Amino acid sequence: MGDAVVSSAAATRADWTDRILELEVGPVAHGGHCVARSEGRVVFVRHALPGERVLAVVNKDGGGSFCRADAVEVLEPSPWRVPAPCSWARAGGCGGCDFQHADPAAQRSLKSDVLAEQLRRLAGIERRVPVEELPGGALGWRHRVRLAVDDEGRAGLRAHRSHDVLPIADCPLTPPGTLPPVLEHGFDPDTEVEVAVDAHGRVHVGDDGPVVQRAAGREWLLSPGVFWQVHPALPDTLAAVVGEWADAPQGGTAWDLYGGVGLFAAVLAGQVGPDGAVTVVESSRQAVADGRAALADLPQVGWRVGRVERVLGGLGARPDVVVADPPRRGLGRELVDALCGHAPDRVVHVACDPAALARDVALFAERRYRLAELRAFDAFPMTHHFECVALLVRA
């Protein structure tokens, strides 16, 4: 018995790096890979699809119960498999895309599977939500991209789970013609440079001036580096859903947490009217400055600069509705408890990570807020990322 335990533990600690495995690929998992098993270990394999049989090379093994691998040969393909439109979307290639080898409709189905699994596992909710397609197709949608610069001043994209900079000539996720002229230039070594396409189609590189963006019937003049969604259709889409579910009353009070430049605040201000109040909380001073300028005609919008967890306690009157668009990690217990302590009737939660959203939904449920509505959008085609909006209603 003791020898068997020692043998099993030794096998678990075995380093399989560079080992070639023949795998029957199982379900998709959160993070852009699928789950397979070999000799009792879990293998997270990229560039594969559920139901396929592949040869995969192990590229990372910490010696525990799982390892990571890249599919390098497909022995039995999925009917969902298509040729990847980019030569860098392969084993050892770019880390930006996860699903170029899958039909776009299949990608959305895989993301829906991930969302359902996270809700079931982390929130105890059985619910399947379709991941909705946004206008514009699966390529050419990325209007903001951050390039890495190598030690010789050449810009490119990073390899998967690596700091190596790949010498790309273009990226099909960006609008045609955007990157090639940028990539011809040299930059300061070992830095990063942001490339943005504005509402006029003009390409901005680094800090070459403000970027004009439009959404919700308004225009913003954004300083370099200030956050704006990378998919051009997403701001209007989110503003419409948030507006519908927030339904702030005339003369009411609304909070816009992690409010950025005030996209949602503009919608909420129209709902509460001149006698209401909308408070935006945002930690970026430059974003607040840009937002104040864009919403200068809406005196019912007030701004607080600071971290949400520090500012929340001093916001005053009970809000009718709260809109929260936190970073990828989600709200977490401390903020959920604090928010529920203010007893808003509704919370509209915007999330870019399904696991973080599911954890937050479970925390809200402990405070008697039920998940009333949920929608998901394929705002990042070819990647494993997608955007969700949830409506939580106080019981």
Image (cartoon, helix red, strand yellow):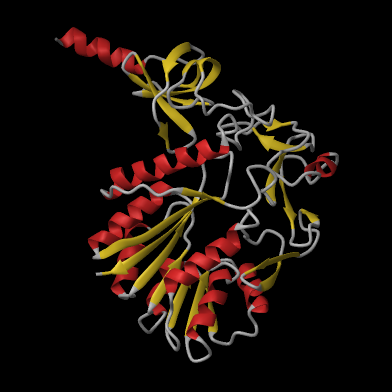
Residue extending farthest to the left is 1
Can residue 277 be seen here? yes
In this rendering, the count of numbered labels is: 0
In the drawing, does residue 120 fall left or right of residue 135? left
Q: Position of residue 122 (x, y in %)?
A: 30, 46
Q: Position of residue 305 (x, y in %)?
A: 54, 73
As rendered, which of 382 and 308 lies closer to the eye? 382
As rendered, which of 46 and 267 lies closer to the eye? 267
Report the residue at 26% width, 13% height from top.
8
Q: Position of residue 376 (x, y in %)?
A: 46, 52
In the drawing, does residue 271 fall left or right of residue 213? left
User: In the rendered image of this protein, does residue 315 appear above or below residue 133?
Assistant: below
User: In the rendered image of this protein, does residue 6 appear above or below residue 170?
Assistant: above
Quarter of the image with the N terminus in it? top left
Report the residue at 58% width, 31% height from top.
160
Report the residue at 46% width, 37% height from top.
110
Report the residue at 66% width, 31% height from top.
164
